[in-house]
Image (cartoon, rainbow, N blue to C red):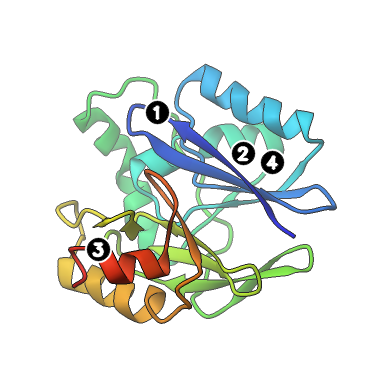
Amino acid sequence: MVQIKKFVFSPFQENTYVLYNEDKEAWIIDPGCFYEEEAQALKEFILEEGLTPVKLLNTHCHLDHIFGNNFVHREYGLLPEYHKLDQPMLDMAPSQAKLYGIDGFQDSPNAESFLKEGTTINLGQVGFEVRFVPGHAPGHVAFINHSEQIVIGGDVLFHHSIGRTDLPFGDYDTLIHSIKSQFYTLAPEFTVYSGHGPETTIGEEINNNPFTK
């Protein structure tokens, strides 16, 4: 069984997830820790639980989801994994930080290998399907575990809302198509762990999300 720990980091209120199993292997997904105390909170949790981080994953490479990539790389020796179509987002991050007036941004290392849609990545014995869900970002992916009905969804679908499409390379129609074809085809009981805000379910959003009616 997979355990999920959520942290809410930075002024962007971004959700960082640590997924881990009985063998104490852990994934760090979208580390948004910007302040030193946030990085320390992440480090202390991993230490207290006796976890060994084995993957650093990015659903996409917008600034708020990669703030902590540098820290995780330095602390645990992990390089980020993301979809190759989001490389431009990673490359733009330093200039985006300046645009937002953010001082102290630490550049993320580049991926050594890219995530590919349709493949399965494994946390121990538990497999997560990589699904391609562009629209909010050109290379956005989600991680889906079918046996435990988990969606690590990034900034695609929120509780009664959807991801922004007014950012560079965003596209509203593409996002809606991603949601309906890649998320709404899942069973209603699937829990969606989003990049911001509370968890939701596929059924809740099919029935009540005003953007996808």
Checking the image for residue 77, the label placed there is 4
Q: Secondary structure at mark 3?
A: loop
Determine the CA span between mark 1 and mark 3.
26 Å
Camera-near label (4 vs 1) is 1
Checking the image for residue 10, the label placed there is 1
Mark 3, residue position = 209
Q: Secondary structure at mark 4?
A: loop
- 90 relative to 144, above or below: above
Few, some or many residues within 10 Å of mark 1 (<14, 14–19, 20+): some
Query: Residue 25 placed where, x, y %?
Result: 77, 50
Q: Is residue 123 left or right of residue 184?
A: right
- 96 relative to 147, above or below: above
Query: Residue 117 placed where, x, y %?
Result: 49, 76
Query: Residue 133 placed where, x, y %?
Result: 36, 70
Mark 2, residue position = 73
As shown in the figure, which amino acid type bears the numbered disc 1?
Ser
Q: Which numbered disc, 3 or 4, marks the residue that appears first in the sequence?
A: 4
Determine the CA span between mark 4 and mark 2.
5 Å
- Do callouts 4 and 2 mark residues in contact (Cβ within 8 Å)? yes
Q: Nearer the viewer, residue 208 or 100?
A: 208
As shown in the figure, which amino acid type bears the numbered disc 2?
His
As shown in the figure, which amino acid type bears the numbered disc 4?
Gly
Determine the CA span between mark 4 and mark 1.
23 Å
Camera-near label (1 vs 2) is 1
Q: Which numbered disc, 4 or 1, marks the residue that appears first in the sequence?
A: 1
Q: How many marks?
A: 4
Few, some or many residues within 10 Å of mark 4 (<14, 14–19, 20+): some
Q: Which numbered disc, 1 or 3, marks the residue that appears first in the sequence?
A: 1
Query: Residue 92 placed where, x, y %?
Result: 29, 45
Checking the image for residue 202, the label placed there is none
